Image (cartoon, rainbow, N blue to C red):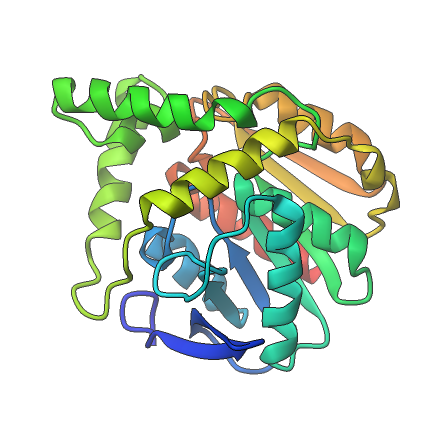
């Protein structure tokens, strides 16, 4: 079983079906992956998923209202974290590791603070602490990238996730090709309602406070590129400052999608961190 062949299943979460996939061995602490603004299951890079699944039980999930999951998308990160906790318990997980990208990293921060016995370690990629400037600009950035990419004959992720250098843009081409490898049982695109709710949640996050991070005692790995235009790279440094037990890794010539551009290094670092 690989990222491109994993079956999409659903689990009932308080009357709502949540779509998820599993890859890798069934034993050990599950590693649950939480994705970015507008993303669904098929937006996970198979190179990252399969690399992690070589050693870990990897679980991908569409939270409420996202992709093939039912219900209405919440308009706060805290409500999304509550949904995640219910999902984890619905699958019978007593303890998990979390890998959150962008908005998913915000969800991971909240649940690590609120559910310390449920979360063992966290990996936070291309994200920010509550109160930092940047998340509220996600929707305008997306709209601008849609227009610019159409004019340039590119995918919006070329502009949002990768640096303008030839090396990074080539990595973007390779990443997008990997996303298209799955041909069957593909996920459902997010709706405009979901995009709107997530945009509101991101704006609320920018108005929040990072004070609660002082209570996050789990080991944390913070990762980003050196040129993130979605959530400014400085936010990763700010996030690291607030976390009591943290490692920080900044990848060169990379943007918001640094973990996809440098997927081999990211997988190596993440597996090492999770097994420490």
Decide: is 231 above or below 246: above
From this viewpoint, is residue 272 visible? Answer: no
Residue 146 located left or right of residue 10 = left
Which residue shows up at 36% across the image and 21% down it? 163
Location of residue 276 by image quarter = bottom right
Task: Where is residue 249? Give x, y as percent.
Answer: 62, 34
Location of residue 85 by image quarter = bottom right
Quarter of the picture containing the N terminus is: bottom left
Which residue shows up at 66% across the image and 76% down it? 89
Relative depth, front residue between 199 and 20: 199
Which residue shows up at 64% across the image and 55% down it? 81
Decide: is 77 above or below 173: below
Task: Where is residue 252? Give x, y as percent.
Answer: 48, 24
Task: Where is residue 155? Give x, y as percent.
Answer: 21, 32
Residue 12 located left or right of residue 263 = right
Decide: is 125 above or below 28: above
Task: Where is residue 74? Give x, y as percent.
Answer: 54, 51
């Amino acid at each position: 079983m690989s990222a491109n062949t994993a079956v999409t299943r659903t689990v009932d979460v308080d009357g709502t079906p949540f779509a998820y996939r599993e890859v890798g061995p069934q034993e050990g602490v599950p590693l649950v992956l939480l994705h970015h603004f507008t993303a669904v299951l098929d937006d996970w890079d198979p190179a990252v998923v399969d690399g992690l699944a070589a050693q870990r039980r990897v679980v991908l999930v569409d939270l409420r209202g996202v992709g093939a999951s039912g219900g209405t998308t919440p308009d706060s990160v805290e409500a999304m974290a509550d949904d995640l906790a219910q999902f984890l318990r619905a699958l019978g997980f007593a303890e998990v590791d979390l890998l959150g990208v962008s908005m998913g990293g915000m969800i991971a921060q909240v649940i690590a603070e609120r559910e310390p016995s449920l979360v063992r370690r966290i990996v936070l990629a291309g994200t920010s602490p509550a109160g930092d400037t940047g998340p509220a600009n996600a929707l305008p950035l997306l709209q601008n990238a849609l227009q610019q990419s159409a004019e340039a004959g590119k995918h919006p992720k070329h502009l949002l996730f990768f640096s303008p250098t030839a090396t990074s843009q080539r990595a973007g081409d390779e990443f997008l090709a990997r996303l298209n490898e799955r041909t069957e049982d593909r996920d459902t695109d997010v709706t405009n309602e979901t995009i709107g709710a997530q945009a509101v949640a991101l704006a609320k996050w920018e108005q929040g406070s990072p004070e609660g991070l002082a209570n996050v005692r789990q080991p944390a790995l913070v990762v980003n590129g050196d040129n993130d235009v979605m959530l400014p790279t400085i936010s990763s440094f700010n996030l690291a400052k607030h976390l009591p037990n943290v490692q920080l890794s900044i990848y060169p010539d990379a943007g918001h999608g640094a973990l996809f551009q440098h997927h081999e290094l990211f997988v190596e670092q993440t597996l090492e961190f999770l097994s420490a």
